[in-house]
Amino acid sequence: MHKRHVASGDYQQTKGIRSEKRIPVGKLFGLKKHELIKTPQGTGFVKGKRSSGYFALETILGEKIHASANIKKNTVRLTARTTTLIQQMESASDSSSR
């Protein structure tokens, strides 16, 4: 099991030099940032949201799983967002170190 703490709020709400672009916060297509979802492209946490229905997926360590997974096709939310993310990780076997 691997744990990671994330902030409880979306503190960055705008982008651009003069803050002219609003970042979508809250739920988008029924999902929030840092929720664990399962898609045909892989299982991971929602890293970024796009208003077109595509999401960026990452592991708990921050490694990219898929840059633009379609949320509208065969997506299942496994866990809701909390401040402490928990994910089962595979460990290296001891036989390879011999």
Image (spheres, rainbow, N blue to C red):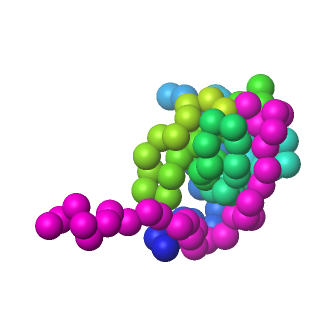
Give percent across and percent down for residue 2: 46, 70
Q: Nearer the viewer, residue 89 or 94?
A: 94
User: Is residue 92 magenta-colored?
Assistant: yes
Measuring from the top left, give residue 43's x and y in whole percent. Answer: 62, 49
| Above-or-below relation of 44 to 86 | above
Residue at point 70% right, 49% down?
A: 38
Residue stretch rendered in magenta on the structure: 70-98
From the top left corner, tell me how far across and down residue 87 is, in percent: 55, 66
Residue 78 visible in the current orientation: yes
Q: Is residue 3 visible?
A: no
Q: Is residue 30 above or below residue 49?
A: below
Instruction: Spot the residue most to the left.
Output: 98
Q: Residue at x 31, y 66 (%)?
A: 93
Left-right relation of 5 to 29: left
**Closer to the camera in the image, 77 or 96:** 96
Query: 90 or 38, which is in the foreground?
Result: 90
Membership of 21 in magenta stretch: no
The image quarter in which residue 66 lies = top right
Quadrant position of the C terminus in the picture: bottom left
Q: Residue at x 69, y 37 (%)?
A: 40
Total marks shown come to: 0
Q: Is residue 46 above or below residue 23?
A: below
Q: Please tell me which residue is depicted at 44% across the width and 63% down the height of the picture.
A: 90
89 in relation to 14, above or below: below
Residue sitting nearer the eye, 73 or 52: 73
* Rendered location of residue 69, percent (x, y): 66, 33
**Residue 14 appears in which quarter of the rendering?**
top right
